[in-house]
Image: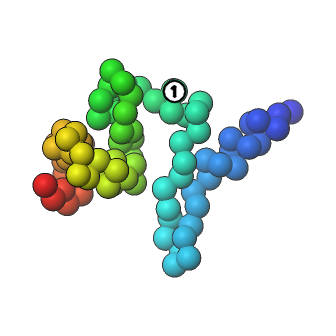
Amino acid sequence: MRSELDSFILSVSKPKTGRTGEVTMTKLTYVERKELPKREFVFPKTRRYPIEDAAHARDALARSSGKPEHATVAAAVKRKYPEIDVEK
């Protein structure tokens, strides 16, 4: 039998669509983020900037823009997702 927490986690982790029908990034739950391997983060020791998929990689680029760590984030995204256009 599915608990309320399991139902909530499943409902949050389903792909969401925006107004134009495109799939938008899903929010990582606490449990999902905790279970991500360290290699899925730009900064593995502090577990900052998860880039487990292309949507999160783009989000990491946007959030780091204008900050000192942007060059490191851009390099990690370019390494993992060469198809994403990374402007420095």
Judged left or right of residue 14, residue 36 is: left
From the image, which quarter does the C terminus lie in?
bottom left
Q: Residue furthest top?
A: 45
Judged left or right of residue 77, residue 46 is: right
Q: Residue at horizontal 82%, vertical 34%?
A: 3
Residue 81 visible at all: no
Q: Secondary structure at mark 1?
A: helix
Residue 13 visible at all: yes
Label 1 belongs to which residue?
35
Question: Residue 38 or 65: which is nearer the viewer?
Answer: 65
Instruction: State the image coordinates of residue 21 (x, y, percent, origin top left).
Output: 54, 74
Q: How many marks?
A: 1
Pointer 1 local density, CA inside 10 Å: few below 14, some 14–19, many at least 20: few
| 88, above or below 17, in the image | above
Judged left or right of residue 45, residue 27 is: right
From the image, which quarter does the N terminus lie in?
top right
